[in-house]
Image (tube, helix red, strand yellow):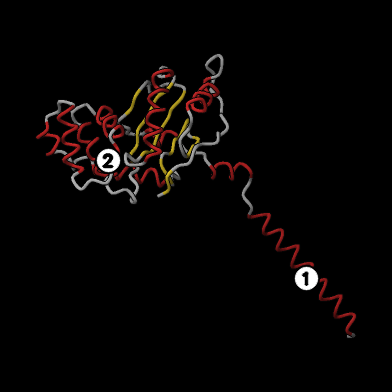
Amino acid sequence: MNSETKFFIGIGVLTIVAIVGGAIFLGNKPSKEEASQTLGAVDQNSLIADAVYTIGDPNALVQVVEFSDFQCPACKSAHTIVKKILETKGDQVYFVFRHYPLSIHKNGKTASQAAESAGSQGKFFEMSDLIFENQKDWQDANNAKEIFEGYAKQLELDVDKFKDEFDNGTGRINSDFALGNKSGVESTPTFFINGQKYPGVMQLDQFEQTIDTIVGPVGATSTSEPLDPLPEENQ
């Protein structure tokens, strides 16, 4: 066999390998539908199941689930926007709060425990307001728990009960965190609106536009495209 024949045989073998390899690659490539599911589709029912701290009608057309960290500055901004949304579009929205305290935050989990303990006395969202509003006062403090006890007194809670039950919400906090990880949460705040993931802070007009798109002019549901959020905090 001369060298020229060997050359053409080699080219033929390489071509076959390339074709087979390409076919395998294309065969393993996810479909457009699978890719979209990977990017953001989450079962909304799993996000709202067993939710304790909620606002609004569970049957509302728009279901908003927020994974938040009380020590996250971006979450403080988001908290203000969510409150405005609930004031203006509360009849269209079912809101669920989920804990996602980041390990980089010294007192984030302690703040969640304070909110949980207040929640056992019916003041979860009132305590959440105080915690976010005064974030700078406790975020680096070595006595954060004592500061939160002061908030409990301000809310006229049973402070002794607040202290005794301070650790009782740890299980729910950990459960929320695990749910966030399972749902693809990587930073705070992260919102899920009817199952679509929106990481970062959404401006008020963006939030309103997303809700209006879902509700539609006659109350029909539809799927909204993700909007560009503000930066979020990474774990």
Left or right: 17 as drawn, with respect to 1: left
Measured as percent of width and height from the top left, residue 120 is found at 19, 31
In the picture as drawn, the residue positioned furthest to the front comes out as 137
Q: Nearer the viewer, mark 2 or mark 1?
A: 2
55 vs 107, nearest the viewer: 107
Report helix, strand or loop for mark 2: helix
Amino acid type, residue under disc 1 in the picture: Leu
Q: Residues within 10 Å of mark 2 (few under 14, many from 20)?
A: some
Cα gap from disc 2 to disc 1, whole angstroms: 58 Å
122 vs 14, nearest the viewer: 122
Measured as percent of width and height from the top left, residue 65 is found at 40, 33
232 vs 190, nearest the viewer: 232
Residue 165: quadrant of the picture: top left
Report helix, strand or loop for mark 1: helix
For residue 146, which numbered disc appears in the image? none
Residue 223: quadrant of the picture: top right
Residue 89: quadrant of the picture: top left
Measured as percent of width and height from the top left, residue 85 is found at 42, 23
Residue occupying image coordinates x 70% and y 63%: 21
Left or right: 183 as drawn, with respect to 178: right
For residue 172, which numbered disc appears in the image? 2
Task: Tell me which label, 2 or 1, sits earlier in the chain.
Answer: 1
Residue occupying image coordinates x 24% and y 35%: 115
Q: On screen, 62 above or below 16?
A: above
In the picture as drawn, the residue positioned furthest to the left comes out as 160
Measured as percent of width and height from the top left, residue 64 is found at 42, 29
Q: Quadrant of the N terminus?
A: bottom right
Left or right: 96 as drawn, with respect to 109: right
Residue occupying image coordinates x 41% and y 46%: 182
Instruction: Read off the residue under disc 1.
Output: 14
Left or right: 5 as drawn, with respect to 23: right
